[in-house]
Structures are given as structure tokens and as C-alpha cells.
Image (spheres, rainbow, N blue to C red):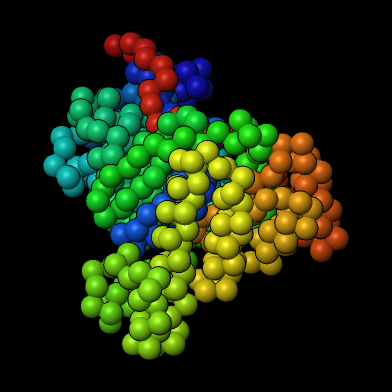
Amino acid sequence: MKEAFRSIFGTQPHGIWAAPGRVNLIGEHTDYNDGFALPIAIPQTTLIAARRRDDGRLRLHSAQGDGPVHDLALADLVPGAVTTWAAYPAGVVWALREAGHSVGGADLHIDSTVPVGAGLSSSAALECAVAFAYNDLYGLGLSAPTLALLAQRAENGFAGVPCGAMDQLASSCCTAGATLHLDIRAGSHEQVPFAPESEGLRLLIVDTRVKHDLGDGAYAALRAGCERAARLLGVAALRDITPADLPAAGRALPAHLVPLVRHIVTENARVADVVAHLRAGRIAAIGPILSEGHASLRDDYRISCAESDLVVDTVLDAGGLGARQTGGGFGGSVIALVAEDRAAAIGASVTRAFRTAGYREPNLFPVSPARGARRIEREVAET
């Protein structure tokens, strides 16, 4: 990173920061309904080498894009002004300034191992790495949750994706060996131990390689449907509806909104069930709950795809404990909880199933709960 930064910008960075991608164990689309979620950070990480600038310019370079440096004037950073990947880091600087923080420019070189479009929050990892870098470069002294919410503001208000806060909170606040039990309305989180390897289990990620774009309108339509349902039911958010309320809610709502409500309500209940099992040390018991979550995403929220469904069916047929689509939907990745001694065979079964169906070969890799965003190297830049 230092060498690349030096070759691009002709000087040394002030430091290097890291922020991970995330996978959501359970609790999908609940965050923008004031609900509960249970993500983990993954080892795949976005790195940023950064140097402060005092001339009002933000210069951005990505090792993945391998293109020219984006040279932006801070004064020109308004929503809609940047439409490429650069909107995510630029949006963080915009959000900091909008929140009243006195921050100037920077040179940023970005490198990442978080797959793009795989439902593993590559955008949140980028935003959070920038937020943490700026926090240190400009001595802001902001907490990790505050930085996460500013990163979410960047994605909502600048990049135009109406996501909830779960992705950014996971990237910022997770710890190794634990899930992050989020209560979005309360703005609180708790680390719940999660070490599947201790029980001879493995959490396997299957990237279907079906790319999704949460800015294309489908995600926004789902959120709007949930918000309309909450208004019609007279509650602040669907978090306030319990499973016992569902029959009455079904009678009060237009038919097309009922499945959305059912998914959110039952998904919040699934988060509670998974947390209870993890606290009791019953990791294997969460498998069927993951599969129930996938059925809800497929049948009620309708954001699955043929490739994701094939992964889940194949994992279960091959002896996996549970599996479900994770992330915003419309493609992306599936998580599978499997016995460690069966992981290779189950992965091979999924690959064969894709080949037989004529799909692109999926990308499979195991993950363990990793550490959240942080500064990983400090250096005094050349003057």
C-alpha cells in the first residue's frame, strides 16, 4: 500500500486504515424497519492509505479500478455530482462536512479484497475505511458507531442507496469471534460469542456471482412498502408488530404489503431465536433458523434468485445444517452452516449443481468472525 501510494501521489501516506466486509448471520432488511440484526465482520477487507491535504482537494485512486486519479474539489461535493465508485468515499467527506466537522481534503489510495456485488457490503467497507481515516487525519475523536452512521448517511444522501445502518455498524463495530447483536432503534449493540469451529462447524460463503445493484430502485421500493405498511398499521416501524399481531395486520393491509410485513416480523423473531441459541452454546441449532430465513426472503420478500435457491437446496440435500441468502438480495451470496468435515464435499456439490444448471461457477470460501475497522499502520508523512 505504501509503495503504491508513493508511486501514485509522489509522497508518503500518513497511515493505513482497514475496514472489513460483513456477512449477516440473520436479520435481513430489518435495519430500516428499526429492528434487529446479527452480522459478523469477515476477513475480506478494504485498505486505505491516506494523507491529509490542505488545499480543498480530494484525490482518489482504486487498485481495482486501475484508472486515473479522481481529483475532486470539496466545494463541489453535492449529491449527484459523483456517479462512479468514487461517490462512496466522496460521500463520506460530504457527510462529515454536512455534520459540521471541519475537515479538508486528502489523498486516498484504495485496495480491497471484498467482492463487489456479492452482498458482502463492499460499499460499507469502503465508506467506513474512509470515515476512520478521516477521523484520525483530522483528530475528530468520533466513536465507531458515530462514524458508522456518518458512513450510512453518505450512502443514503450522496450515493443514493436507501440502506439501513446495519452494514456500516458491522464494518465499524464488530469484534473477532463474535456476532454483533444490533438493536437499530435503540442505537445499541452487543457482542455475542460465535465460534463455529469450536463445535466442528464451518460458516461457508457461496458467492453466486450474480451481481446486484441496490441503487436500481428495487431496494427502495421494498423500503417504501414497509414504511407504507407501518403508516397504515399506525406504528412507527414494523419492529412494533409482533407475530401475534400478524393476523390482524393481514386484514388491515393491502394484500401486496402483507408478505413484506410477515417477513420483517418473523425475521426479527428469528434474530432473537438465534441469539438465544448462541448464548446457550447451541450453534448447530441455528441451522434450521437460517433456512427458514431463506424461505421468507424467497417467498415473502421475493428477493432471492434461481442461483441462490439452488445453493440452499444443494447444501441442505448434501447434509448442511442450514443455509440462506444474505445481503440486500437479487443475487449476491449465500451463507451455509456445515460440519467442518463435510465442508469440502458440500462445496463440491454446489459447484457441480451450478455446472449442471449451466450457471457460472460460484466462488466458495469459509469465513470466521473478524475484527472491525481500525488503523493498522501509522507513519509520519514527508513534509
Q: How many marks?
A: 0
User: Which residue sits at x=78%, y=58%?
Assistant: 317
* Residue 59 makes an appearance in the image: no
Question: Could you tell me which residue is drawn at 39 percent across and 36 percent down?
Answer: 191
Identify the residue at horizontal 50%, vertical 22% (top origin).
1
Residue at 68% in and 58% down: 312
Q: Is residue 106 above or below residue 292?
A: above
Image coordinates of residue 183 in percent, x first then y, are: 32, 50
Specify whether residue 157 is in view: yes
Front residue of 139/228: it is 228
Judge left or right: residue 328 versus residue 268. Answer: right
Question: In front here: 331 or 243?
Answer: 243
210 sits to left or right of 354: left
- Kindly indicate the quadrant of the structure image that contains residue 43: top right
Quadrant for residue 10, please give it.
top left
Position in image of residue 119 (x %, y %)? 54, 52
Point out the image quarter for the C terminus.
Answer: top left
As drawn, which residue projects farthest toward the front? 280
Q: Nearer the viewer, residue 63 or 368?
A: 368
Expressed as whole percent of the image width and height from the top left, the position of residue 285 reads 59, 49
Report the front residue among 162 and 7. Answer: 162
From what the image shows, is residue 258 above or below residue 287? Answer: below
Compared to 7, does 56 lie above or below?
below
